[in-house]
Amino acid sequence: MTTPTVEPTWTEPQVPLPGCDVRLPSLGLGTWAWGDTATWGMNGYDRSYNFETIRGAYRAAVAAGVTFLDTAEVYGAGESERIIGRLLKEEAAEGDANRERIVIATKFLPFPWKIVVSSALMSALRASLQRVERPWVHLYQIHGPISLRSHQAMAAALAEAHQAGLVKAVGVSNYSEKEMRAIHAALARHGMALATNQIEYNLLRTWPETNGLLRACRDLGVTVLAYSPLAQGRLTGKYSASNPPPGRRNFSAYPMAEVEPVIAELRRIGTVHGRTPAQVALNWVMCKGAVPIPGAKNQEQAEQNAGALGWRLSAAEVAALDGVSKPGQRRLMHRVWQHG
């Protein structure tokens, strides 16, 4: 479906992070697939992208105002960060002022065997900074609640990174309400705010709405970053029961036969606005007060994602989508990794 040209009727708000001067656009760009061949496969099932197509995705996203890039040390064993560094270096060489508009978030993977959290975190952060070729990052996140160290120890390590001028804001990912409240309180003892909690959140996983997590984020002033907002492609409309998504896509893994009623409602509402199912699905996340961070591996995908900007669903349309949404599935990775 080709998206028609629609004059914007909505001034897109920015999202200020607490305790710092960082402001996020309403839509971000997830870079998990950039260089992560083990999961997404430049040489695996998806041979359609490479650095040239990633460059196209990056430039199209930035041109549309999507200047927030989310990455992690573990994505492609650092390759995602290296690609971002290369893209920023190219822009600097070209004298492009866009480079200074880019907001970079990355993550520390707190494996249980990293006993001395402060030294492990600082070492990982400095390695990430080398790869993105920046002296600091805007947002540094704990990738998951899997460390055996206390929230106090983790907060102290984050505070050390902040005091060293290596990060502007700190956040977490996949934290439950209880875990989030604990590290929020621990950071407060260092005079710091918990800026974000990055969670899987989409129309096929609305559990954060019913388990109290979204409400707690609002109460604490924590910004919700929604990864997998298109349910790893299931909400784009390009897959069906007869043509399921390929590869290892474990998030929001409902059979496509169960997803098709959701797609039908996305199409119905999209027709009203001249938008694709994916754009409607992303707009729904934004209407819930979260910042979706869909991936994009080429220019077309980035432009399609950007079509979620500049307009808003009505309250009735949000309610209609709520009515066909799904709570999500409780899987082993949720018990071990995704507490949020």
Image (cartoon, grey):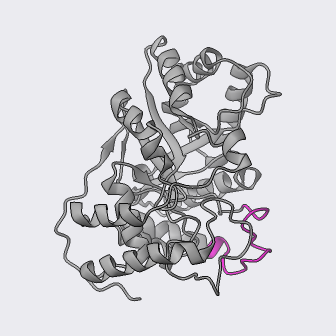
Q: Is 287 situated above or below 266?
A: above
Measured from the top left, where is residue 121 in percent x and y?
A: 69, 28
Q: Is residue 338 visible?
A: yes
Quarter of the view holding residue 191: top left
Q: Quadrant of the N terminus?
A: bottom left
Instruction: Assess whether residue 81 is covered by the magenta stretch.
Output: no
Q: Is 299 situated above or below 74?
A: below
213 or 278: nearer the viewer: 213
Tell whether 11 sits left or right of 64: left
Q: Quadrant of the C terminus?
A: top right
Measured from the top left, where is residue 242 in percent x and y?
A: 64, 87
* Total marks in image: 0
Magenta span covers which residues?
36-52
Q: Residue at x 69, y 20 (%)?
A: 118
Q: Is 311 situated above or below 137?
A: below
Q: Main secondary structure of the magenta part?
A: loop
Quarter of the view holding residue 251: bottom right
Tell whether 8 sits left or right of 257: left
